[in-house]
Image (spheres, grey):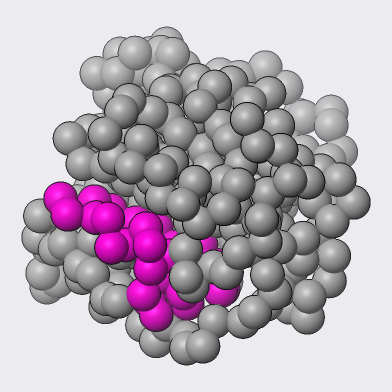
Amino acid sequence: MRFLAKFLHVRRSELERTLQVAGFATLANVLASLCVAAQIPALMMVSERGTLGDFQIGQAIVCRAMRPILETLGIEHHTMTRLDEAHFIVDRTIKQAYLTQAPAALILSPLLTGERS
Amino acid sequence: MSERRNAKTMNRLDLTKRLVARLKNEEAVIGGIGNSNFDLFGAGKRPQNFYMLGSMGLACPIALGVALAQKRRRVFALEGDGSLLMQLGALATIAMLAPKNLAIVVWDNGMYQITGSQKTATSAGADVVEMARGAGIKQSAWASDEKDFERSVEQALKGDGPWFIGARIDGKAAPQQTPREPVIIKDAFMRGLGVVPPSKG
């Protein structure tokens, strides 16, 4: 997380305020009724838990539901796994979200953030 | 200080018209789901009105975002009791961030009116003004009657917030509904706030 924050020129504390998958799962209604319906370019950064060794079954189930929810709503999403790709993906995703007036999600994989399971 | 049990039961459309009549400086108003935004629409179209469709419980968070983004503009959230109960954490966030330009009006008729008038917890004694105070919004009060409501709105227009105004209302449905045009509503609201929506393609 520290390296990603440095790479994106943000404070680590700002990255630590990203959503986790459980928080994301509470947002289906507002994503559908506000962001998608009104074409609002909300950018989400979702810290991916519930995968790659997570021991919490609830987190794992919600993690498996996250991408199907995004796809059902037609929300563009990318999973970030490598630091050398981070700047390109973030820059292009923000640009596209704004230009097309559509929400988008960046999923921060444990491969990138190094979060403990 | 008025308490809930002593507050007069008023009418949402009448109070909304009284509020809108006092807005002289392009104040933003966020109408919550259902009858809250129907009556805002019925009180007269304004470019600075946002008619929120379908996002139950989010009038206060949306108003907070507007208040933080445009600190020189006064912002009102009009929310129902059922909607507020669904998103009570927003009160603590508002108290923590303490935007001086934000006022919350909660219409309390003790029911989920739009879905068939099922009872909300306020019908059993939950007090949204006490909840707002408990969350840290010190300037929270019930409007005892229409004149008191107008006084509270005037205070919110002139003094530093955040403010929380509770208004007990009847169960009369809004006489007209807001057109379901979310993109048009968003674009009109952005322009009303002096923000030009980007063109696509």
From where the camera sits, is residue A110 visible? no
Q: Where is B75 relative to B111, above or below? A: above
* Quadrant in which the C terminus of chain B is drawn: bottom left
The one of A70 and B155 positioned closer to us in this rendering: B155
The one of B53 and B152 positioned closer to us in this rendering: B152
Q: Position of residue B152 (x, y in %)?
A: 43, 41
From where the camera sits, is residue B121 visible? yes
Q: Position of residue A29 (x, y in %)?
A: 60, 62
Whether residue B70 sits left or right of residue B100 in the image: it is left
Q: Where is B60 relative to B68, above or below? A: below
The one of B11 and B135 positioned closer to us in this rendering: B11
Q: Position of residue B72 (x, y in %)?
A: 17, 35
Identify the residue at horizontal 37%, vertical 58% (top origin).
B19
Whether residue A65 sits left or right of residue B10 in the image: it is right
Identify the residue at horizontal 42%, vertical 23% (top origin).
B98
Specify start and end residues of the magenta stretch as a single range.
B16-43
Quadrant in the picture for residue B154: top left
The stretch drawn in magenta includes residue B19: yes
Identify the residue at horizontal 90%, vertical 51% (top origin).
B124
Whether residue B189 sits left or right of residue B196 in the image: it is right
* Quadrant in which the N terminus of chain B is drawn: top right
Q: How many marks can you see?
A: 0
Q: Where is A20 relative to B198, above or below? A: above
Quadrant in the picture for residue A20: top right
The stretch drawn in magenta includes residue B68: no
Identify the residue at horizontal 38%, vertical 28% (top origin).
B161
Q: Position of residue B148 (x, y in %)?
A: 49, 46
